[in-house]
Image: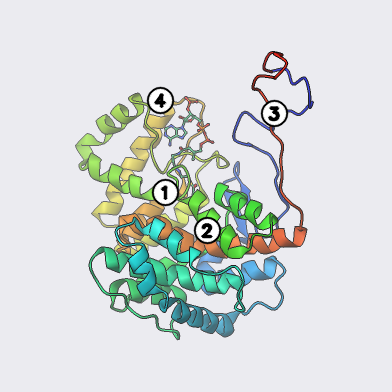
Amino acid sequence: MTIPVSGLRPASASGLDNVVAAETRLSHVDGEAGRLIIAGHDVEELAATHDFEGAVAALCAAAGLDQAPAGEALRAALGEAREAAFALVPGLLQLAAGAPITEGLRTGLSLLGDEADAPDHIRLLGAAAVFTAALCRAAEGKAPVAPDGQAGHAEDFLHMLRGEPASAAEIDALNAYMVTVSDHGMNASTFTARVIAATRAGTVSAIVGALCALKGPLHGGAPGPVLDMLDEIGARENIESWLEHALAGGARLMGFGHRVYKVRDPRADVFNKAVTILTNGNERVRFARDVEVAALAALRKAKPGSRIDTNMEYYTAVLLEALGIPRDAVTSVFAMARIAGWTAHVMEQERVGRLIRPQSVYVGPWPDGRAAA
Ligand code: ACO
């Protein structure tokens, strides 16, 4: 391509591959080694030693928010935020009646103002849990369950969702999930949040925009289709023919492939372990593993040289299904946790204080009839 006027060149074919868009102290993704570091911890270690509140505190500290509450103070602040958000639920349920859960969450978060006294990350985290639980129940014709401000965040979410207490194993599994997905480098939704934050639009606006980016099936919208795939395959004898037919038709297998990981996504292993403990390796989990093995073989055959491996969304689907999260709500539960990372990135970006404004290369016609580049 010739670029006659500006001399600018596209950063990559079309997806900004390998472009460094920010410096961050929050997380690091090593796609060749299959390693994820969050706030100085390997993800496996963080998930084994921290609950969700611990991960939020670690991310705030890494973002340089020295005054952010941690420990019991954070647990209490999140409890208060959930209670405050519950007052907005009746209005939200009217506005979002009949909408998919993630769109309902998007509407709900938009109800929060950009200017507020309470710390943004705590308001948003509290509201996301309350809204997601209430929207799920409303979809089943059930009344919302009020939060318990004294409970842990994951524990209270499961209680608000079901109307009855969750077991310790379920609470541990949800904490492991939420910690593991709390941040992940410069993914599409985090980049969106940082672009919006850089305009000084405010944290709520940045997080609503990030949620919009997350909900697409190439990003955080994959788990629902993963479960649809497992259901459609149905039985072991159908696995190979179903996969072969799907790939021959040009379909993408949901839960496989990643822009950065060229080996197995380490988060898939955290979730595989968590769901095995939670379900004692039940038939659904064993079936999902068999489909995974066959899918990797089919992808290697159909896309030789593409280095496509399992991404975290595959076992997210299986884990959150085992926790009784409705299929339609999986992306919202992902957002409930990722808000920890998004808000920390917003804090970092606000400290940078510079507008993010790349360039494009004009390839259209010129008024003087000159040929397009
Ligand atoms: N199934 C089938 N083929 C695939 C898959 C897949 N899951 N992933 C990539 N490919 C193929 C593409 O079709 C393409 O083939 P081609 O060269 O013959 O056209 C080749 O591999 C390269 O694909 P790209 O789209 O260039 O790779 P990219 O880095 O953009 O892909 C992505 C990353 C979007 C995640 C892709 O792997 C995909 O669509 N996966 C399925 C959706 C999914 O699981 N999303 C969740 C990602 S994890 C997350 O965001 C939390």
Residue picked out by circle 2: 208
Q: For the residue labelled by badge 3, is the local secondary structure a helix, a strand or a loop?
A: loop
Q: Are marks 3 and 2 in contact (CB under 8 Å)?
A: no
Q: Which of the marked residues, 1 or 4, is nearer the chain's N terminus?
A: 1
Residue picked out by circle 4: 302
Q: Which of the marked residues, 4 or 3, is nearer the chain's N terminus?
A: 4
Q: Which of the marked residues, 4 or 2, is nearer the chain's N terminus?
A: 2
Find residue 366 and report its horizontal and vertical position in percent.
Answer: 69, 19
User: Neighbour class for label 3 at 10 Å: few (<14), some, many (≥20)?
Assistant: some
Q: Is residue 128 above or below residue 79?
A: above
Q: Which of the marked residues, 3 or 2, is nearer the chain's N terminus?
A: 2
Per the rendering, the mark at residue 361 is 3
Q: CA distance from mark 1 to mark 3?
A: 31 Å
- Residue beneath the point at 54% across and 54% down: 209
- Residue beneath the point at 54% across and 73% down: 123
Some atom of ligand 1 lies within 8 Å of the CB belonging to the residue at label 1: yes
Image quarter (top left, top right, bottom left or bottom right) of the N terminus: top right
Q: For the residue labelled by badge 4, is the local secondary structure a helix, a strand or a loop?
A: helix
**Amino acid type at mark 1:** Gly
Whether residue 239 appears in this view of the structure is yes
Some atom of ligand 1 lies within 8 Å of the CB belonging to the residue at label 4: yes
**Amino acid type at mark 3:** Val
**Amino acid type at mark 2:** Val
Residue picked out by circle 1: 221
**Front label number (1 vs 3):** 3
**Front label number (4 vs 3):** 3
Left or right of residue 204, residue 159 in this image: left
